[in-house]
Amino acid sequence: MLKIRPHHILCMRAYSGNGYSEEFKVKMENVIKEIKAYNEFLQVSNLKEEMKEVELVCYTDNICEKCPNKLGENLCSSQEKVSLLDLKVVKRFNLKEGIYNYNDLEELVYSNMTEDIFDDICKECEWYDTTNCKDYIISVK
């Protein structure tokens, strides 16, 4: 089962091919593809099974595996920053660590997303001024 940090819910939705390294980019793209492929398979097959389940965790996740900032399990060079991002997502959307249907998780976050919430969560992110995350996430409702 994929482990996903709360703030990565936002990052995956707006991901546009940027990253910290080539290995990180490939890992991010593979996680996104895995979730999409599983959900598309179930929809095309008309199967009534649950959509992709993920485990929401507030520590290093599957995406972090190839991040050059990762120093070890549950530790990265920007630990304070990413922990704050996770905390803000958890508080804003009343989430807890645990197992979620990924589509339900996305629906919960994006149906309640506003520009003010996005700015509160993401304004300190290094990608905030260099990508179109905000425009993409706020306009996709």
Image (cartoon, grey):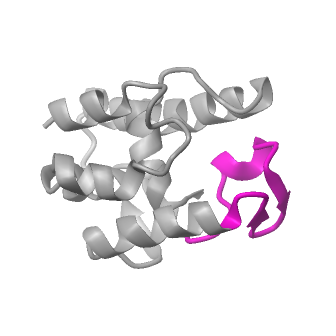
Residue 7 is covered by the magenta coloring? no
Spot occupied by residue 119 in the image (x, y as percentages of width and height) = 30, 50
Q: Is residue 23 visible?
A: yes
The correct choice, above or below, for 96 with respect to 133 in the image is below
Q: In the rendered structure, does residue 65 fall within the stretch colored magenta? A: yes
Question: Which residue lies at the image location 58% right of the left edge and 58% below the top edge?
Answer: 1
Compare residues 71 and 121 and report the one nearer the observer. 121
- Residue at left offset 51%, top offset 35%: 127
Q: Residue at x 47, y 29 (%)?
A: 15
Q: How many marks?
A: 0
Direction right: furthest residue: 71
Say which quadrant the C terminus sits in: top left
58 lies above or below 60: below
- Asked which quadrant contains residue 70, the reply is bottom right
Percent from the top left, x then y, of residue 113? 19, 52
Is residue 140 in view? no
Would you say 28 lies left or right of 67 here? left
| Rendered location of residue 54, percent (x, y) | 48, 59
Identified at 72% across, 33% down, the residue is 20
Q: What stretch is highlighted in magenta?
A: 57-79
Left or right, 81 with reference to 112 = right
Image coordinates for residue 35, horizontal then vertical, percent: 46, 39
Instruction: Say left or right for 17 vs 51.
Output: right
